[in-house]
Amino acid sequence: MKKKLKLISTERGIQSFLGEAPLIAASIRITNACNFRCPHCYTEGGLVTKNELNTKEVKSMIDQLAELKTLYIFFTGGEPFLRKDIVDILKHTSDKKIKISISTNAQLINQQVLKKLKNLNFNLFQISIEGTKKVHNEIVGKEAWEKSIKTIVLAKSILKENIGVGTVMMKENWNILDKVILEASRQGADIFSLMLLIVTGRAEDSMMPVPKEILEGLQQLFNQYRKLQTKIKFAQNTTILPALVPKE
């Protein structure tokens, strides 16, 4: 007779099973510098701030997180690849046996950069795509979409797996999310992350879809996902409210 597995849901239970209670994940905003000025950016990415951590300080933070048995670190910005030491920082994270998640607008990624990252322990290499070609370029910048698509294909060929597309749901794209996840899958992405708009920084209330639009957009998205889920999965950092996710 098969025994039914029990869900470990308390810190005491986790500690008893694993011998310790690990810190599941941490997020490091590695820089505020960004080569774009997206209107929906909740960090107001743009210029480097005066008090940003240097390489030694970032590595020290990673070392401390390793001591806490952190499983994942998510590196965000701004644009992380504007830091000249980003590859060194990611290598240090991987050497500490911590899985790496990172979000990029893809504009600074090329074959040379990806080859340096090839053997690192990526849980998610996420590229921002905010819509179809026309919509993305209107939001982010001229010809940004073309570079992002090329980077998805290139990253898939070099890193092989855990290539993600990240999209923020807003007024301009709520009704084309199904097209975004389809394009992401076609280009080789195997992870899709949908984030609801955070109304802070440059983002304003007027950019937020109304509840009816959110529900309709998600319904279209999940209908598409049902057809694609053997090829692409939702990311752990997706911020869809559980109540809005279909039961199946």
Image (cartoon, rainbow, N blue to C red):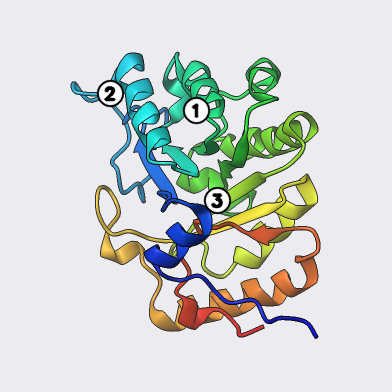
Q: Secondary structure at mark 2?
A: loop
Q: Secondary structure at mark 1?
A: helix
Can residue 131 be seen here? yes
Q: CA distance from mark 1 to mark 3?
A: 22 Å
- Could you tell me residue 59's position as x and y percent? 38, 21
- Could you tell me residue 36's position as x and y percent? 41, 33
- Could you tell me residue 84's position as x and y percent? 45, 14
Quadrant of image for the N terminus: bottom right
- Amino acid type of disc 3? Gly
Q: Give the mark nearest the N terminus, 1 or 2.
A: 2
* 136 up-or-down from 242: above or below: above
Tell which tag, 1 or 2, sits nearer the viewer.
Answer: 1
- Could you tell me residue 192's position as x and y percent? 62, 56
Give the labeled residue for mark 1: 93
Residue 171 appears left or right of 118: left
- Amino acid type of disc 1? Thr
- Amino acid type of disc 2? Val
Q: Residue at x 49, y 28 (%)?
A: 93
Number of on-image labels: 3
Nearer to the camera, 247 or 66: 66
* 42 up-or-down from 3: above or below: above
